[in-house]
Image (cartoon, rainbow, N blue to C red):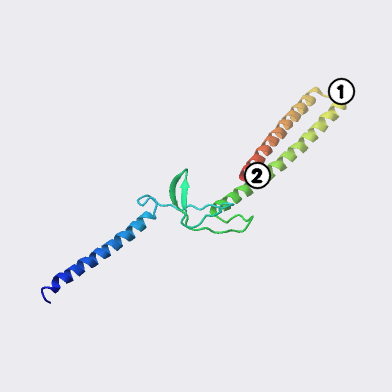
């Protein structure tokens, strides 16, 4: 190699190094710029919406007006079908449990109503006698009052069950 070619080869090496460095820097700037919270912990969130007009992958996600991420994927589900997510499965199980509890409470309330009816019939029959026993009458009246309290408690429980079911649905 001649002395005149050495500076050209050195200049070529420096030029290649500068071009490669600029390309790497440009790629790094684009990569860092597309990530929100580069040094923050990442998490994934999924949501199901009725209307996502104009939403597309890459769109900015805002939480209380603060940019927190980007949309990764948009999918279209079947109309009227609830997606089979873990949360939805858990909610379905909870609703089924609430329905079973509500049904048991309704049966217990019906049994209490029947018991109250029988006690009331016994009290009415006792009152129709010529000379009813006062102790028996007091005992039946106390039993009827207790049965009424149980029926009222079951009615209140059924109202709470229906409220819980409406909240769960």
Q: Residue furthest bottom?
A: 1
- Pointer 1 local density, CA inside 10 Å: few below 14, some 14–19, many at least 20: few
- Residue 98: give x, y in percent of width and height: 63, 45
- Residue 22: give x, y in percent of width and height: 28, 61
Name the image quarter holding residue 25. Answer: bottom left
- Considering depth in this image, is 23 or 28 the residue closer to the camera? 23
Decide if residue 74 is on the left or right side of residue 12.
right
Give whichever of discs 1 and 2 has the lower sequence position: 2
Gap between marks 1 and 2, in whole Å? 46 Å
- Pointer 2 local density, CA inside 10 Å: few below 14, some 14–19, many at least 20: some
Decide if residue 133 is on the left or right side of residue 22.
right
- Residue 37: give x, y in percent of width and height: 38, 50
- Residue 143: give x, y in percent of width and height: 74, 30
**Which structural element holds mark 2?**
helix
User: In the rendered image, which residue does mark 1 sit on?
Assistant: 131
User: In the rendered image, which residue does mark 2 sit on?
Assistant: 101
Whether 86 is drawn above or below 130: the answer is below
Q: Residue at x 70, y 36 (%)?
A: 155
């Amino acid at each position: 190699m001649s002395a005149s070619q050495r500076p050209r080869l050195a200049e070529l090496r420096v030029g290649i190094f500068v071009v490669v460095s600029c390309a790497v820097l440009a790629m790094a700037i684009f990569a860092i710029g597309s990530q929100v919270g580069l040094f923050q912990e990442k998490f994934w969130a999924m949501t199901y919406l009725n209307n996502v007009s104009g939403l597309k992958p890459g769109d900015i996600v805002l939480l209380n007006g603060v940019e927190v991420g980007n949309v990764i994927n948009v999918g279209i589900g079947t109309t009227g079908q609830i997606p089979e997510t873990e949360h939805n499965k858990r909610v379905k199980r909870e609703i089924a449990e609430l329905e079973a509890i509500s049904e048991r409470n309704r049966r217990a309330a019906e049994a209490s109503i029947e018991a109250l009816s029988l006690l009331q019939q016994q009290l009415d029959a006792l009152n129709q006698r010529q000379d009813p026993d006062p102790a028996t009458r007091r005992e039946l009246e106390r039993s009827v009052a207790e049965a009424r309290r149980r029926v009222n408690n079951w009615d209140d429980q059924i109202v709470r069950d229906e409220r819980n079911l409406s909240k769960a649905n």
